[in-house]
Structure formats: C-alpha cells, structure tokens
Amino acid sequence: MRTGAAAGYQGYLHEAVYYRSAGELLAVAVPFLLGGVEAGEPTVVALGEEHAGLVREATGGDPRITYLAGGEMYARPASAIRAYRSLLVDHVAAGAGQIRIIGELAAPAFGPTWDWWARYESAINHAYDDFPLWSMCAYDANRTPPHVLRDVARTHPSVAEPGGRRRSPSYTDPTTFLLEPRPQPDDPVQRTRPVAELIDPLPAAARQAVRGADPGTLPAGALDNLVIAVSEVVTNAIRHGQAPVLMRLWTGADRMVVTVSDRGPGPKDPFAGLLPRTDGEPGGLGLWLTHQLCDFVTVDRRDTGFTIRLVAGGL
C-alpha cells in the first residue's frame, strides 16, 4: 500500500529537493523519512557523510532507517542502477508495499562527468518504474551549477518542498531526453595529438593499441577494463554502425581517453549503456558493460554520426 504523497500512485515517484541550507534540507527529509518509518516502509538514506549525520541526529538515530554510503552507491551511473534495482527487488520480495529513499550526488559529479549523471537521472524514471518507490534527490541550490539545475528540472517530474510538492514544468520524458544531441566538450588531453588513430580497426588491433599506449599510471585494473570496453565499442560500431569506423586514443599523466566514431545514428534504444538489454537487441550488453567498466562515458549524437568516448583514470 502506498502512503504519503505516493498514495494511489503507480510506479516510481521521483522528486527533486532544492535546498539552500541544512535546515531547508531537513525540513523535507525528516518528515519524509519518519513518515516511512511510521508506515512500516523500508526507509533509506544515501546522502553524503555530513548530511547523513544531520539526518541521523534530527531523526533521533532511529534504527529503522537504513544508511548507505552515498559515495559507494554513486560510483558510476550504470552501477548505481544495478545496485538500487537489486535493493528494490529484495524489499519487494520481502513484502514492501513502498520503499522510500533520499540520496544525493557528490559535488564532483557536477563537473566534467555531469552528462552521464544527467542521463542517469533521466533513465531511472524508467529503470525503477516497476517498483513501488518514492525517492528524493537532494541538490544544494547555492552550489549546484545552473546548467546542472536545468537538467535536474528536466529529469525529475516533481519537486518536494516543505509542506508540499509541485510538478516540474520542464520535465522531459526519458525517451526524448536521452536521444537529444548533447555535444560534449573535449577532454583536455584531446587537445594534444592522438597517440593512435585507426580506421576500421579489428577489435584485436584496437585492444593492442590501448595496451601499447599504457602510460603506466592508471589505477589497478583500469587498463584491463578499458581494453574490454574499447573492444566492445569497436565491435558494436563495426557490426551495427556505418563505415568508416574511426578510433582515436590519447594519453595523459593520469588517464587514457578513447573515442570511437562511425557515420550511423547510434543505438535506437535511449537507455543503451545504462540498462542491460533483455529483448535481444544487438549491442545492448556490450554498451552496458562499457558503462560499468570505464570511469566516464559520453555519447555524442549528430547528423554526421555517432561518437562514444571512454575515459579511464583521473578526471
């Protein structure tokens, strides 16, 4: 049974919370969480350490509220979706009629990697819609960049405020938002000459190029992950894109950047990469693995073709 603002609601109720002080955040978060506790609903906090501490104090340390490490949950968008879906499946299997979650992204997400987090915020409107979930995503209106706030308004159907809520007039359906052209600025290392440039490469040649360009400074496992991701993306481009396929590779002191482009329109599935395909659509699993393995992934759809950029290492 659904309770609170979600009473009678079907599927996922996804709300943004804009706050300018800790008091404003608590004014929304505390009634939301205590309402869940009183209704016997699984109630979860996935805020950063500072805000989680404030919430814990304001709710009297109620043991019925579960606290997750926000930084761990939001390591990568596709991983976050996988982890949350697993959590939701467990709660529903245990008989939950509604689950409440409040979370927040760490400030670094609003920098160069914001695009894939914007795609995450849009995609979860679909990814969680088969669960009785009511969640709130908290954003500090003082510190969040204006372009991020614009995307937040377009990816959250409603806004929670002390004592009520309102619809977001700029909300955009995920099937539209995720297929919009979202050209991304170049990574700084892309301003240098590529260390490798291959036309219509076989996956083996692509893998060899990545290994041969290893700067020796990537975190453990990052090179192997990038090799797998590049192989998957090149294979998809050859099989499902339009020739020519162009792969470029750059290295920096702390990271590697690879782009793979072709003349095709890119995947038809707006959720490609963020959700695994279950209907047999070609290329879906490879893109999903890529989003799990890399530290940052962007997709760029233009009239001239489709480009995916993979980053391993520091940002």
Image (cartoon, helix red, strand yellow):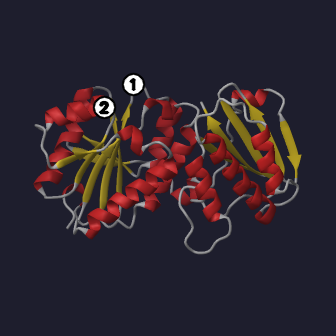
* Side of 129 relative to 213 (left or right): left
Q: Estimate the x, y position of residue 123 in percent, counting from the top left.
A: 50, 55
* Residue hosting label 2: 49
Q: Disc number at residue 172? A: none
Q: Quadrant of the N terminus?
A: bottom left
Q: CA distance from mark 1 to mark 2?
A: 19 Å
Task: Describe residue 41's horizontal placement relative to residue 300 as left or right.
Answer: left
Residue position for label 1: 142
Tell me residue 236's x, y (percent): 74, 61
Q: Secondary structure at mark 2?
A: helix
On the image, the x and y values in percent for residue 92 come to: 28, 67
116 above or below 179? above
Which residue is rendered at x = 30% and y = 55% of the image? 134
Residue 152 showing in the rendered view: yes
Which picture quadrant has residue 133? bottom left
Q: Is residue 169 above or below residue 129?
A: above
